Amino acid sequence: MTTNVSKEKRKDLTTKIKAIHKYISTAKQDENTRQFLTWLSEIEKEINSKKFGLVFEEHREEMDEILDTHLPVLTEEKRLFIDNGGQINFLIEGDNLAALRLLLKTHKGKIDVIYIDPPYNTGGDDFIYDDKCIDKTDTFKHSKWLSFMRCRLSCACSLLSNSGCIFISINDNEQAQLKMLMDEIFGPDNFCGQIIWNKKSGGGQTDDFFVTEHEYILVYQKTKQFKWLDEII
């Protein structure tokens, strides 16, 4: 995990590391001193690597490990084929990360529009991470969700054409974190806007404080080549 450190604190830690580095460099050189110098270099790099942005504990899923050494393969269900006069659409059923990695082999930079309705990580049964349901008591629930989303959104970004855009539904539970993650992956300059839509109407107090009747859709473009054309009535 990379931790944000203030400028003054970073400067102070770097000064101390350099002093330790200098001291070890003057000692008798052996395998231990070389290992200590390597560790110090890694620590210094880590301290200086993060200036601003989203910081969280990164996790790897079992599927990440599988995809490191195995390429997913599609198998056609011929009995479900629909003849649409030569036009072909694909419905892929399976692990979404594996499907995205496979699509990168054939559709990288070719997709114009992506819409994602991810799990909202509300602590219920909506979010399964590595075959386990993430509930409200999991102290890593936000970092697991962000790790889950980062690898998939990175694939989505690579799939988009330069004139493409992506829409992502979310609610208050992860909206702020998702906005920062999207800024990191797509760049803050490619944020098109945030749609706020009314998800329900009428009464029904299910929240502790305010009645929540809205959710969000974050919209990002891949590059400045994206053109938004309002419908003319």
Image (cartoon, helix red, strand yellow):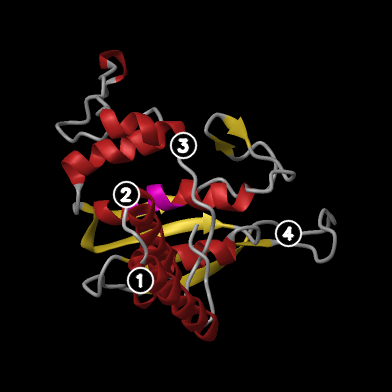
Q: What amino acid is found at the position of numbered circle 4 in the picture?
A: Ser
* For residue 224, side relative to residue 197 (left or right): left
Q: What amino acid is found at the position of numbered circle 1 in the picture?
A: Gly
* Residue at screen point 25% across, 70% down: 223
Determine the residue located farthest toward the top in the rendered image: 79
Q: Which residues are magenta?
A: 150-155
> Dot 1 corresponds to which residue?
187
Distance (Cα) linking label 4 and label 1: 35 Å
Determine the residue located farthest toward the left in the rendered image: 86
Front of the two marks 3 and 1? 3
Front of the two marks 4 and 2? 2
Distance (Cα) linking label 2 and label 3: 15 Å
Q: Earlier in the sequence, mark 4 or mark 2?
A: 2
Q: Is residue 177 found inside the magenta-colored segment of the image?
A: no
* Residue at screen point 44% across, 50% down: 116
* Mark 3 in CB contact with mark 1 (< 8 angstroms): no
Instruction: Quarter of the image for the C terminus: give it.
Output: bottom left
Say few, some or many: other residues with alpha carbon within 10 Å of mark 2 (under 14 / 14 to 19 / 20 or more): some
Front of the two marks 4 and 3? 3
Q: Is residue 89 above or below residue 178?
A: above
> Dot 2 corresponds to which residue?
155
> Dot 3 corresponds to which residue?
61
Say few, some or many: other residues with alpha carbon within 10 Å of mark 3 (under 14 / 14 to 19 / 20 or more): few
Please give the label number shown on residue 201: 4
